[in-house]
Amino acid sequence: MNEREKILDKYSAKVFKNRKDHVVQFDNAGMPKEIAANSRSIPGLMSNRGCCYAGCKGVVLGPLRDVVVLTHGPIGCGFYSWGTRRNKAKSEDGKSYIQYCFSTDMQEADIVFGGEKKLRQAIEEAMELFNPSCIMICSTCPVGLIGDDINAVATWAEEKFNIKCVAYSCEGYKGVSQSAGHHIANNGLMKSIIGTGDAPLTKKYSVNILGEYNIGGDGWETERLLEKIGYEVVSIFTGDGSYEAIKNAHTANLNLVQCHRSINYIAEMMKTKYGIDWFKVNFIGIDETIRSLREIAAYFNDPTLIANTEKVIAEELEEVAEAREYYKEKLHGKTAAVFVGGSRSHHYQMLLADFGMKTIIAGYEFAHRDDYEGLEVRPNVKVDADSRNIEELTITPDDKYYHLSIDKERFDALKLTTELEYYKGMFKDMGDGTIAIDDFNHYETEKLLELFHPNIFYSGIKDKYMIQKSGTPSRQMHSYDYSGPYAGFKGAIKFASDTYMSLFTPAWQYITPPWRMQPTLEGKVGGAD
Ligand code: CFM
Ligand code: HCA
């Protein structure tokens, strides 16, 4: 039995039938590299996934600092998404609501008689207290079940207060994971916000950063590097992002996509509507940051910009050179497990490789097949009823704002050598013998620990302490355990230093689990002497 078979071995026939296609190992002759993804979890299997509301409100919309993101529902959903994602934001313009949790706090009577009245009251209260220019309403499960007309309330709010108000039907049960919520949030931003600003189309090297949520300050570090080279960052989706900036996102000349999973819809829709090309970049990892910066410079193809790029790369490398060598020596040869939502499990493998660490097991909670296998599989992906539930917008070129930055010939040439409008996915970077798991669960995590003994396990809050109790250091790859930034050159060193701390802390020497000192089971097996 290989490791994959051992992981699946104890499952009942029914569970085995489902899970077998979500677990792949990379050395079996005949083993298809195809993986089952973006399908329903088995109830009771202790999946690490979240819901559609989490993906829409928590992930994509929540980081917008000048928007009152109002959770329409009982208080739990709002409360449990209050500040937990650790997306940072500044409040220089005095309009940052990021530290607040806004909710309609629906009660039983609202569920029985309807919650629209309470929603209107909440909007009135938010206007009185904060006077925002934009309010976004996010629905939780009961709202969809009782049928509150949140769109009618949004129209009422726009007329009454002369603001932008967008309603999102992102009830938790829509779709199979957070991923559905990303799509719904992307659609709302595209339909109602992007392209509504009136900034002129004059900037030369202007970019949007898509799929960068400023966890631990990653977005700020990325922005610092880009601005040092000479780019103008028009907007960030959505880390420390703002309604005011996103309105003018259509004026940028290039879209940089960091997290493909959560924002590919906007990148593709903006290409159709405004002609803006997109690049799959990755600012996690030193070599990957260098690759990304060089590819962006090659796109604009200006000798000064290219020279500035090389100058900034050299300066930043010089600054981290000594620390890089130190951590490389300490971390070289260590093995890692990386299990995060829908993009980091790939990105962080490259950062680990910078320090000579090897990823032996990896997986996503809710990625789609293209995030594993590359964009080329898209035409072969079967769209099931859960995905069909989510609206696909019909987008056409915009008469006023459609603008191309480079001609078709250069586009085609660049596409051959760079990650221009292409995401290669995680699998191509995984080595022989490694295992990838989709929608991993608690039991599979235990089996992985037992079979692979990784030196460190990067994951999230739901499994961190279970892993640590098994004697394996675990770091949260969602919240960075309240550290960061991990992006760019300096971020890579911060990450290496945190990993080094986790691995080499003397605490591990002082932990002797009770079962090492005292047997938990005593007796004879099968009547032997
Ligand atoms: Fe993209 Fe994210 Fe991720 Fe994601 Fe997330 Fe996150 Fe994540 Mo947690 S948007 S897919 S839905 S990179 S919140 S910042 S850490 S699971 S791997
Ligand atoms: C979410 C948010 C989350 C959860 C993190 C975790 C995040 O999925 O709703 O499980 O540790 O990054 O905060 O992914």
Image (cartoon, rainbow, N blue to C red):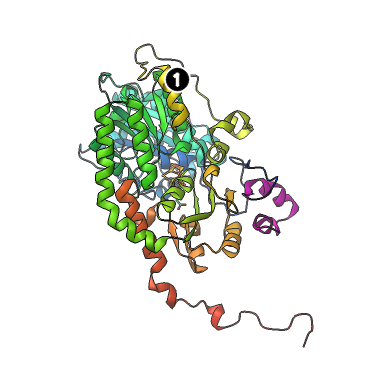
- Vertical relation: 299 (above or below) 24: above
Magenta residues, dominant SS class: helix
Badge 1 density bin: few <14, some 14–19, many ≥20, Cα 10 Å: some
Apparent side of residue 45 relative to residue 455 in the rendered image (left or right): right
Magenta stretch, residue numbers: 2-27
Amino acid type shown at disc 1: Thr
Numbered marks: total: 1
Q: Please, what secondary structure does the residue beneath circle 1 have?
A: helix
Apparent side of residue 374 relative to residue 283 in the rendered image (left or right): right
At horizontal 31% and vertical 33% (from top left) the residue drawn is: 124
Q: Residue furthest right?
A: 527
Disc 1 CB within 8 Å of nearest ligand 1 atom? no
The quarter of the image holding the C terminus is bottom right
The quarter of the image holding the N terminus is bottom right
Q: Which residue lies furthest to the top in this view?
A: 399
At horizontal 59% and vertical 33% (from top left) the residue drawn is: 377
User: 419 and 246: which one is in front?
Assistant: 419
At horizontal 45% and vertical 22% (from top left) the residue drawn is: 412
| Residue 96 visible | no
Apparent side of residue 30 relative to residue 37 in the rendered image (left or right): right
Residue matched to label 1: 272
Picture coordinates of residue 234, whole percent (x, y): 29, 29
Q: Residue furthest bottom?
A: 529
| Residue 268 visible | yes
Picture coordinates of residue 91, whole percent (x, y): 23, 41
* Residue 110 inside the magenta-drawn segment: no
Picture coordinates of residue 414, whole percent (x, y): 42, 26
